[in-house]
Image (cartoon, helix red, strand yellow):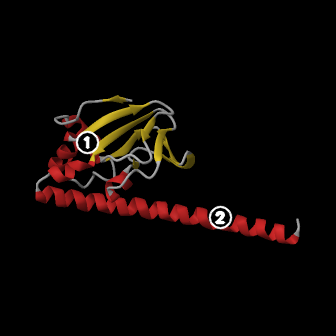
C-alpha cells in the first residue's frame, strides 16, 4: 500500500469530495474536518485492505478500481465505482470486521478515519452523523435487496435440484 499523509489543508480536494454522494450536502468546514483525518491509499491488485476479524475505525471510498469482498476466504461480492463505500459496517457496529476486502484491480481509495466524528464540535458532529447514517441506510438497503434476490434465486435452484432428486432424475 502507498499512503499519503493526512489531507488537512488540501483545499484542492474539496470539490472532488463534494462530488461523492455522501459529501455533497456537507458544509466546507465539515469537509475540511473529514479531509483532516483522511488519507489517499493506493493498493496493488490482490493486496488486502481490510482483514476479517480486525478492529479499526477506517471506512473507504473508492476513487478508482474494484475491490473483492471475501468471507472465510470465499468471494461474496465486489464493489466498484467512484464514491462506492466499504468498511462502513465496522464503523456502524464498532465490532470486528466481518469480511476481508482485497483490491481486485489496482485501486485508489480515500480512507477516512471515522473516529473523526468524536473530535468534531457538537453541531458538526450531529450534522455528520445525520449524513453518515442516511448514507449507511441507503447502502444497507441496497445490499439487503441484492442479498434477498440472491437468496430467492438460490432457493429456486435448490427446489429444482430437490425435485430432480425426488423424481430420480
Q: Which mark is residue 153?
A: 2
Q: Which residue is found at the position 17% from the left and 57% from the top? A: 125
Q: CA distance from mark 1 to mark 2?
A: 41 Å
Q: Nearer the viewer, residue 163 or 86?
A: 163
Q: Earlier in the sequence, mark 1 or mark 2?
A: 1
38 to the left or right of 64:
left
When the figure is inspected, residue 95 is found, relative to residue 152, above or below; the finding is above
Q: Which mark is residue 15?
A: 1
91 to the left or right of 159:
left
Q: Which residue is found at the position 33% from the left and 40% from the top? A: 110
Q: Which residue is found at the position 48% from the left and 64% from the top? A: 144
Q: Nearer the viewer, residue 109 or 90?
A: 90
User: How many residues crowd around disc 1 within 10 Å: few (fewer than 14), some, or many (20 or more)?
Assistant: few
When the figure is inspected, residue 130 is found, relative to residue 16, above or below; the finding is below
x and y percentages locating residue 63 in the rendered image: 38, 39
User: How many residues crowd around disc 2 within 10 Å: few (fewer than 14), some, or many (20 or more)?
Assistant: few
x and y percentages locating residue 55 in the rendered image: 34, 47
Q: Nearer the viewer, residue 18 or 113?
A: 113
Amino acid at each position: 500500500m502507498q499512503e499519503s499523509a493526512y489531507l488537512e489543508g488540501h483545499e484542492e480536494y474539496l470539490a472532488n469530495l463534494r462530488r461523492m454522494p455522501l459529501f455533497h450536502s456537507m458544509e466546507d468546514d465539515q469537509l475540511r474536518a473529514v479531509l483532516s483525518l483522511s488519507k489517499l491509499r493506493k493498493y496493488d491488485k490482490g493486496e488486502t485492505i481490510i482483514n476479517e476479524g480486525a478492529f479499526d475505525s477506517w471506512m473507504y471510498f473508492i476513487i478508482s478500481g474494484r475491490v473483492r469482498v471475501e468471507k472465510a476466504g470465499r468471494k461474496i461480492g465486489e464493489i466498484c465505482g467512484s464514491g462506492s463505500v466499504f468498511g462502513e459496517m465496522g464503523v456502524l457496529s464498532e465490532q470486528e470486521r466481518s469480511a476481508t476486502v482485497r483490491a481486485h484491480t489496482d485501486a485508489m481509495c480515500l480512507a477516512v478515519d471515522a473516529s473523526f466524528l468524536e473530535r468534531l464540535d457538537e453541531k458538526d458532529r450531529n450534522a455528520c452523523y445525520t449524513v453518515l447514517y442516511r448514507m449507511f441506510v441507503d447502502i444497507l438497503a441496497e445490499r439487503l435487496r441484492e442479498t434477498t434476490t440472491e437468496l430467492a434465486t438460490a432457493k429456486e435452484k435448490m427446489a429444482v435440484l430437490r425435485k430432480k432428486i425426488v423424481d430420480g432424475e
